[in-house]
């Protein structure tokens, strides 16, 4: 019995090892089911193969297929810095022209509020270009000044600021006319205020649209003045005061270049307000004898020139004293 069982076991092991399946039951019963999971055989490679071939006409090359507009933009040469600067300069000049037109409209409104003039008087309502124009305009305004005081004053105020804002010559003649129309205590503050406001408006225009214009048309002169301003930046108010009193630089150049070289607006306004007072004093005094003047040069006497020199030295005196005090402390 034992030998028969051993024989069956050896046959079953032999059958398992040779056939790779489970042995049959030793009692001769139904064979055990094969518990291993049978997966379907993988399909032949041809099943996973797709036909990727197509004609050359169906090929899309995203590297070379471009629209004509894009090709034109890509082939267009890039604008250089000179072209960009030229476009910015033109844009700045257009904005400046638009502001100028708006100012002319404001002058028209002021003119419409002026009293009705005779036909022979209309020829004298113009910006004075010489001393004769100033005489005629002064006489005309003096004729209406008593009855239309505020209209004449507002018209004078607006026209003076207009000339200063756009650096138009003629403000000297208006300063002379103020001495002819008004008492000194009114004429001097009026001229100084108009000069400071008009110069500040010119400063703002240059800050907004004139920086490129200055760098384009006055590069060397602006660079030279910037070096001087940098040397006196600690005493910038006194320096602006000195320049307004003396004729070393024209006022229009100071107005348009100050924002370019980073002069603060508040310092610029105060320096202009007090700096134009001595020259305005000379012109207002000359305006008291307007009917006798033959040219603006008659306003300059040796006494007036000496007076301006004294005011210029007074403007620089705090700077000199401060430097001497600092030298002693060091």
Image (tube, rainbow, N blue to C red):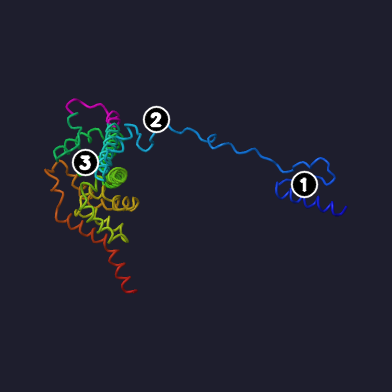
Looking at this view, is 144 or 258 the one in front?
258
At 76% from the left and 51% from the top, the residue drawn is 13
Report the residue marked by disc 1: 23
Q: Is residue 131 left or right of residue 204?
A: left
- Dominant secondary structure (helix, strand or loop) of the stretch shown in magenta: loop
Looking at this view, is 156 or 18 the one in front?
18
- Secondary structure under the numbered disc 2 in the rendered image: loop
Is residue 115 within the magenta segment? yes
Instruction: Work out whether 98 lies above or below 262.
Output: above
Q: Is residue 186 visible?
A: no
Is residue 239 within the magenta segment? no
Per the rendered image, the range of residues in magenta is: 108-121
Q: Is residue 263 visible?
A: yes
Say which of marks 1 and 2 sits in front.
Answer: 1
> Disc 1 and disc 3: Cα gap in Å?
120 Å
Instruction: Work out whether 93 lies above or below 328.
Output: above
At 62% from the left and 38% from the top, the residue drawn is 41
The answer to which image quadrant residue 313 occupies is bottom left
Instruction: Work out whether 124 lies above or below 214.
Output: above
- Secondary structure under the numbered disc 1 in the rendered image: loop
Report the residue marked by disc 2: 55
- Secondary structure under the numbered disc 3 in the rendered image: loop
Q: Is residue 177 left or right of residue 48?
A: left
At 74% from the left and 50% from the top, the residue drawn is 14
Residue 258 picture location, percent across and down:
28, 51
Q: Which mark is residue 168?
A: 3
């Amino acid at each position: 019995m034992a030998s028969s069982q051993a024989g069956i076991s050896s046959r079953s092991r032999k059958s398992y090892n040779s056939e790779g399946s489970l042995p049959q039951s030793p009692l001769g019963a139904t064979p055990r089911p094969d518990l291993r999971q049978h997966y379907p055989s993988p399909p032949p490679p041809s099943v996973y193969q797709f036909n990727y071939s197509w004609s050359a006409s169906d090929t899309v090359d995203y590297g070379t297929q471009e629209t004509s507009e894009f090709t034109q933009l890509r082939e267009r040469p890039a604008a250089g810095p000179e072209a960009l600067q030229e476009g910015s300069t033109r844009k700045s000049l257009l904005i400046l022209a638009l502001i100028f037109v708006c100012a002319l409209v404001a002058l028209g409104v002021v003119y419409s509020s002026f009293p009705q003039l005779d036909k022979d008087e209309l020829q004298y309502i113009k910006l004075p270009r010489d001393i004769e124009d100033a005489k005629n305009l002064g006489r005309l305004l003096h004729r209406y000044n008593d009855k239309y005081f505020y209209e004449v004053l507002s018209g004078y105020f607006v026209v003076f600021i207009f000339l200063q804002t756009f650096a138009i010559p003629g403000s000297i003649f208006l300063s002379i006319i103020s001495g002819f129309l008004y008492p000194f205590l009114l004429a001097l503050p009026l001229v100084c205020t108009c000069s400071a406001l008009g110069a500040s408006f010119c400063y703002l225009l240059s800050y907004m649209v004139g920086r490129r214009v200055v760098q384009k048309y006055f590069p060397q002169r602006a660079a030279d003045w910037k070096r001087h301003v940098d040397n006196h930046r600690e005493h910038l108010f006194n320096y602006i005061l000195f320049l307004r009193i003396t004729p070393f630089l024209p006022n229009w150049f100071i107005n348009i270049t100050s924002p370019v070289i980073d002069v603060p607006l508040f310092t610029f306004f105060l320096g202009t307000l007090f700096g134009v007072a001595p020259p305005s004093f000379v012109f207002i005094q000359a305006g008291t004898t307007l009917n006798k003047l033959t040219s603006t040069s008659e306003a300059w006497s040796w006494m007036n020139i000496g007076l301006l020199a004294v005011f210029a030295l007074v403007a620089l005196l705090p700077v000199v004293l401060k430097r001497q005090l600092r030298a002693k402390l060091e």
